[in-house]
Image (cartoon, helix red, strand yellow):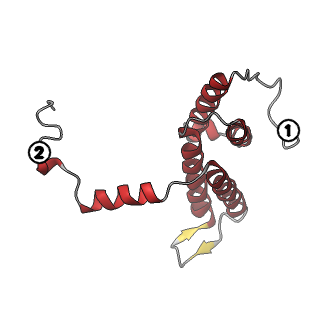
Amino acid sequence: MTNDDFAGGSDALPGDAELRLYARAYSGSMTADELFLRWEAYLAHGLLLGQIPDRDYPEYRLTGRQLAEGARIAARRMALLLAEARTDVREVLALKIHTFEAMAQIPAEGATSNTIFMVEAAMKSDAARLGIVLLPLPHAPTQAQ
C-alpha cells in the first residue's frame, strides 16, 4: 500500500455500516464509573455462569460455559475501555488498580488474553503521571485488599 492508495478520494470514505459504528461509538462513550460497573457486572456474570457450565440455554444456542466465556470477553472489553483513557484523577486510577488486582486473581487470565497486561501498563502510566509510586505486592492480591 502506498500513500496514494490510502484515503485516496471519496471512494475511500467510510460506508454506511462504518459510519453507523462510529456514531454508536461516539454516542455510547461511558464514564470511568460506568465502565467499571459494567466490567464488574460482566465479570460476576461470567463467574456465575461458569458454575453451571453444562446448562443449556436453547434460546441462545449456547451452554453456560460458552455464555460464561462471552461474559468474560465483555468484561475484558470494559476493562480495556477503562484502561484506554489517560487520567489525572486518583479515583479513576483506583478503579484501574482494582480492575487489575481482581483480574490477577483469575486463573490463567494472562494466558487467555493480554487485557490484564494492558490494564497494568495503563495503570502504571497514569500513576507515574500523577506522581504515585506503585509497589508490587509481596503476595497475590486478595479480596481483603
Residue that label 1 marks: 145
Q: Residue 41: image x %, image y %?
A: 68, 59
Label 2 secondary element: loop
- Crowd band around label 2 with a 10 angstrom C-alpha radius: few (<14), some (14–19), many (20+): few
Alpha carbon separation for disc pair 2 and 1: 55 Å
Relative to 122, say whether 17 is above or below. below
Residue that label 2 marks: 9
Q: Amino acid at mark 2?
A: Gly
Point out the image quarter for the C terminus. top right
Relative to 56, say whether 8 is above or below. above
Q: Amino acid at mark 1?
A: Gln
Q: Residue 116: image x %, image y %?
A: 61, 37
82 to the left or right of 22 = right
Who's the residue at 60% across and 26% down the image? 125
Label 1 secondary element: loop
Total marks shown come to 2
Determine the image quadrant of residue 141: top right
